[in-house]
Image (spheres, rainbow, N blue to C red):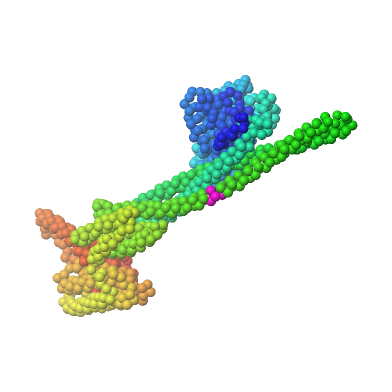
Amino acid sequence: SKREKKVPRQRPNINLLFPFLSPPQLSSISKAINSTETPVKEKHARRIILGTHREKGAYTFWSYALGFPLASSSILSWKFCHVLHKVLRDGHRNVLQDCMRHHSSLVEIGKLWAHLHDRYGQLVAIYTKLLCTKMEFHAKHSEIPPNLEVTDEVLERTAGTDINNVFQLTVEVFDYMDSELRLAETVIRQLNTSIAISTLTSGQCRLAPLIQVIQDCSHLYHFTVKLLFKLHACLPADTLQGHRDRFHDQFHSLKSFFNKARDMLYFKRLIQIPRLPDSPPNFLHAASLAKHVKPVVVIPDEDDAEQQDDDDDEPEPLIELDIFDQAFGPPNGGFDDRDLQIESLKRDLELLRAELERVKAEAQRYITQLKSQINSLEAELEEQRAQKQRALVENEQLRMELEATRNGLVRRSSAERAQATEQRYNMLKQKHTELVASHAELLRQSADTVKMLSATQQTQEEVERTKQQLSFEVDRIKQESDLKLEEQKFEMEKLKRELEEKMAEVMRIKATLQSSDSLTALQAEKERLMRSVSEKEAELSSLRQTAQVQQSSLQQERERNSRELGELQGKLQEKVSQDIKEQIKRKILEEQFALLQGTITEAESIIQDAVAKLDDPLHVRCTSSPDYLISRAEATLGSIDKVKKGHADYLSNMGDAGGLLRALTQFSHLAADTIVNGSATAHMAPTDHADRLTENCRDCGSQSLQYLKELKSKTSLQRADPAAIRAVVQKILHLGQELRPKGRDVGKEELGDLVDKEMAATSAAIEEAVRRIDEMMNQARKDTSGVKLEVNERFAIRMLIVASTDLQKEIVESGRVSHAVPVLDLKEAACVFVCVCVCVESADKVVLHTGKYEELIVCSHEIAASTAQLVAASKVKADRNSKKLPVLQQASRHVNEMAANVVASTRTGQEHLEDKDTMDFSGLSLIKLKKEEIESQVKVLELETQLENERIRLGELRKKHYEIAGVPLQDASDGNGETSSLFSPASTSPKPSKPTLLKKPALAQKPNLPPKATVQPININT
């Protein structure tokens, strides 16, 4: 027969089993979501919600709902949105995750109906936007459930302590409320608020979703009040003016909506709508928060309504048939091919289990890979954060250095150094911007990885739910098998009872027939009954054997399947572990090489920027000293050694490129610094040296870029060698040493001897000057009858030179000697020597009436200036606790006092002599006076021209003097602007107590002197 034919082996479809797994839920879905213009019944919605709690998700709901023709019926779409709103509010917590997977489908449905001119279609477009906003809000803030029923503590915890998060959360709640109010206003605008419309089914179909809108709006209103009071406690009122205006608009719209809904008969039996206050809260007064009352929506008891719905709805048939009776047909005499079908289903179930395990293993592998990727990205993110922090610290240091440099440059009236620092600051600022952009990109990659991980976890949850459903099916099959065994046992017991009844009947008949004559007929009946009993016993034994065979075969099949499953799982795990290890190792190598390529790219950009500055016209004004160039070149040579060592370490272990990355970063910055400072040094060097230095800087840049290019490629990584870069940098180092001033090449051992020789020559010159001045003054006393001259016998300059010599010996012996300060001392000693000689000659001429007083004044100025510079240089290198430094300072002050007295006495004597030649123009006529005036004007112009030429000549002489002395032009210009070594006398006394510091007057200016008094003696302190 057809029942005895073997059913072919088929793999069961899970989607086909859903109608048998939860028929009440699917029946309610089909009855709740239809194209009839009636409201959704509460019992159908409740069954759908109970189904989501039973299966812990909305998989069944969406698998059935996706088959609805939502694009063809606006009423069907409207009721679907209503049911989905209820499921989101009251369904299981996993419903939100299942609904987010169909977010794009909801958006497409809304866009479709928004372009069609249909009254329900416009409502569907607004409703889908509300549902999408609701899902996005609760997916972002998982602490707040979709029904919005949370305590104030949970709301405070969600908002957090960061005022920016509170501000953002308030804006999102405002948007949420706007979506709810827009739907309510659109529905009420389409309906007439009269009693007749609100009681019709067409009106109730539109008004039914507003119950959920009222529930949402009451909670959102409370959230908005709480968040706005919190914002006003932390921010000024002017900043939140827009928030207050938006809340006032929403408050009046919500109050109007509640009042209109409260007047409708449809809502009076379904919901109690709260009353809002007459005026919105005053957020400018914190005490108003205590007056705020949370609006509470009350849903009355719905037993009567549900009873009415149950009476109206047709009764659902009870499903008494077995699931497999519906699927495979009724039984055939108790023995059919159900056992074979059960066996086939079990085998299919085992296959599904194996496939489930494979999917789980694959998902676990993906999770492991994603976790490793997340760890690597987090490590890279931490490194980028550390680099960003270092860049910020360096940026702050450079900003402070720039500020200090700017202040110094304002005092020195020079902008060159500020411009260079500003360029470097802009460059670092650009690097900082790039680091911030890289940091943001890494954050976005981390967010994408987290999203992928969440999707994988959701897939794993779906697999877990499918596994639970399969386990439920296996338990159902086991129960059916046990039920069949129980039925067979029951039949066996029934047959036994029938046999016992037959035996009892036979015994009764036998006892009855003992007194009868028809013994033969009874004997025949007895034999017939005995044959029947034997047949029944044989049938019973065959049934027992069949049951035992089936049970043993099932047990053997179960054991064999478990063994095969264990072997397959072991092989799968072993293969997956090997693949994961190889992938991790390969990925580590690729990531390390990618980091190396990124570092090399950054290093190339740094060096290219430095090479580009060689031809930059703005860089021509930048200068640098050979000493700084030498220090940069030496540091670059050290970084080349580190790069070579890091390269060797990376070739030995390509899984760790940290040492090479650090070395390349340091090398790129130092090489770029060497190139830039080499170009800046070439701007001050002679033509030959400048050309060679610039060419070597270009070679350094090209060789560095070539070496980095070799490191960047895997084919040339092995043979990359920085020897060419080392050779070019050494050439730059040698050129820098050649450009250093020759005076700085004096060794420390020779400095003491040079100072001693110079000081001895200066002392000898002073002794000779003293002798000559004595002779001149003796001769002058004999011949002069006008102005009386006196000589100070203490000779302050001699005391100064002696004190300076002692201090220099102490410094040289202690080893506190640099390459610049002793040379400066030698120069100042030579200047003192020259000034002493010139001063003696000028004094000789003045005494003999053949010289000029101006020469004596200039010599005094120069002696005082050289003395001040000598003391300043000695302060730089002398020990702070030196006892000879105060002696030198005292001698310097004494020299300044004597020089000031010489200037004052000389000027007074000159004016006294000039007063003797009184101009007398009484004998001249008008014509001669005019002629004399014209000649005087001509002479004035000639003298002014001569004065201007002499000033230019003086400037060139000073510049040449600074070049010979080895002083940079910047220092020379700084020293030219202000001289602090000249003192003007505070009084006309020959021994002023504390002279004041004044600037050195120009040579053509007349010094500001006190009124003339008696002739003062000239104290020549040389």
Q: Magenta span: helix, strand or loop, mainly?
A: helix
Q: Is residue 294 above or below residue 857?
A: above
Where the N terminus falls, by quadrant? top right
Residue 171: x and y in percent read 51, 39
Residue found at the very far right of the displayed protein = 515
Nearer to me, 914 or 959:
959
Q: Nearer the viewer, residue 272 or 400?
A: 272
Residue 945 visible in rendering: yes
Q: Vertically, is 125 above or below 394?
A: above
Query: In the picture, residue 732 is in which quadrant?
Result: bottom left
Within the image, what quadrant is residue 790 found in?
bottom left
Viewport quadrant of the C terminus? bottom left
The image position of residue 746, as x and y in percent, is 25, 72
Residue that appears at 33% across and 75% down:
815
Q: Position of residue 178 (x, y in %)?
A: 53, 33
Query: Magenta includes 952?
Result: no
Q: Residue furthest front?
A: 520
Q: Residue at x 25, y 63 (%)?
A: 731
- The residue range painted magenta reads 566-570
Q: Residue furthest top?
A: 196
Residue at the spot 82% in from the left edge and 32% down from the top edge: 523
Q: Choose between 550 and 189: the one closer to the eye.
A: 550
Q: Position of residue 470 (x, y in %)?
A: 59, 40
Visible residue check, residue 384: no
Q: Residue at x 53, y 33 (%)?
A: 130
Give the quarter of the image for residue 198: top right
Number of numbered markers: 0
